[in-house]
Image (spheres, helix red, strand yellow):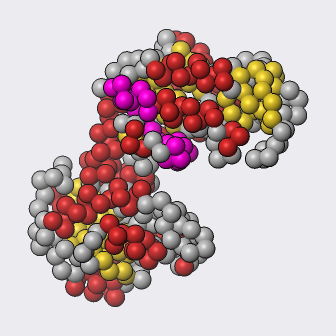
Amino acid sequence: MQTIDNYSFSGKKAIVRVDFNVPLNKETLEVTDDTRIRGALPTIKKIISDGGSVVLMSHLGRPKEGPEDKFSLKHVIKQLKNHLQGVEVKFADDCIGDNTLELKKSLSGGEVLVLENLRFYKEETQGDENFAAKLAEGVDCYVNDAFGTAHRAHASTTIITKYFTEHDKMFGFLINKELQMMDTALNISRNPFTAIMGGAKVSDKIQVIENLLSRIDNLLIGGGMTYTFIKALGGQIGKSLCEEDKLDLALKILKKARENNVKVYIPTDAVNADNFDAKANTNTSKTDETPDGWMGLDIGSETIAIFTKVINESKTILWNGPMGVFEMDKFAAGTTAVAKALAEVTSEGAFTLIGGGDSVAAINKNHLADKVSYVSTGGGAMLEYMEGKELPGIKAIRG
């Protein structure tokens, strides 16, 4: 398999699949978080420093029927230029077509061309071969550096690789780092190994939990999924979120955990609200004694202390999913406490891997991204990789 480190881009045009699906300000359409743009910079700079030129392609948002200005990648150009001082950055107002092909052909070494949003064409998500062939026109090599879409067999992530030789297709630095970090967690982790799983639904995390049970020592449960477990165990959950059809599944997870000698920690107390609202009235209770008419929206102080102790004693930690509705300050204490505990234990030598949009947002909200071992850029892709699934975008290059 070709590697970007050993490849010379001198005199070559490289088409790079990046993940520039970044948040934009609704009024000004300016980039509000450029984490994903910064993540692509090492790959872009390597190609430029070698004397090559770069064609960048990405999706942005979820356009429904063709081009929409609010989803145009022209809005990322300013931020990209700020990071690539002195580099010529051009924009093609289409990702395929004769004009775009001419722009590709006219690129000189050291220049960058950003193509318009791939998802303005339904053929992108359909994995259309003809569309992929058009994307591949006018360039010499392909680099996939968009881990966040590696679990999709889209034209730009998977099908396009058919048009390049083994020698001329490779991963970028970001994907290489993602795979290295996940493989570290899965294969060379130090014990105790703790997985922290939060979020709303057990069904969203069941496969990754089942795959991890043979590897981990502790499983901390948080978020809305808590109450599916609590109800399955016979507790009173008020009007807390619960997947009624997944009660047997919750018990099955607990049984499998016991068989694998995994200690499962389910929240024992919670901060409740009488409404799903930032201004709701609140109280605290045992999670299995939630009053009628109330819903649990965050873990309580007793659970925070227990979770923090487990984290402090761990050597490898994977975190996916918040402990509560952390977007509302009233219900952010549990998620913030976990984030800070992870930063603390990282400083003492533990390996901490954070993935999933909400977990990443929580880490960023607390300004701790540089205080943990690694923050993954791909929530869905990370989970599927952790589940043991073969990601189409990875297989297309790894073989």
Q: Position of residue 234 (x, y in %)?
A: 77, 18
Q: Is 324 positioned to the left or the right of 169 in the image?
A: right
Q: Is residue 60 above or below residue 389?
A: below
Depth check: give the residue in front, 352 or 393.
352
Depth check: give the residue in front, 153 or 227.
227
Q: Quadrant of residue 236?
A: top right
Can residue 252 be spotted in the picture?
no
Q: Is 12 positioned to the left or the right of 338 in the image?
A: left
Range covered by the magenta-colored residues: 343-366
Q: Is residue 394 above or below residue 315?
A: below
Depth check: give the residue in front, 116 or 50.
50
Q: Is 333 positioned to the left or the right of 396 in the image?
A: right
Q: Residue at 38% across / 43% down in the picture?
A: 370
Q: Position of residue 330 (x, y in %)?
A: 71, 40
Q: Is residue 225 above or below residue 88?
A: above
| Residue 347 within the magenta-colored segment of the rendering | yes
Q: Is residue 41 above or below residue 397?
A: below
Q: Position of residue 76 (x, y in %)?
A: 43, 71
Q: Residue at 78% across / 27% down in the picture?
A: 284
Q: Quadrant of residue 158?
A: bottom left
Depth check: give the residue in front, 224 or 140.
224
Q: Residue at 80% across / 35% down in the picture?
A: 282
| Residue 326 within the magenta-colored segment of the rendering | no
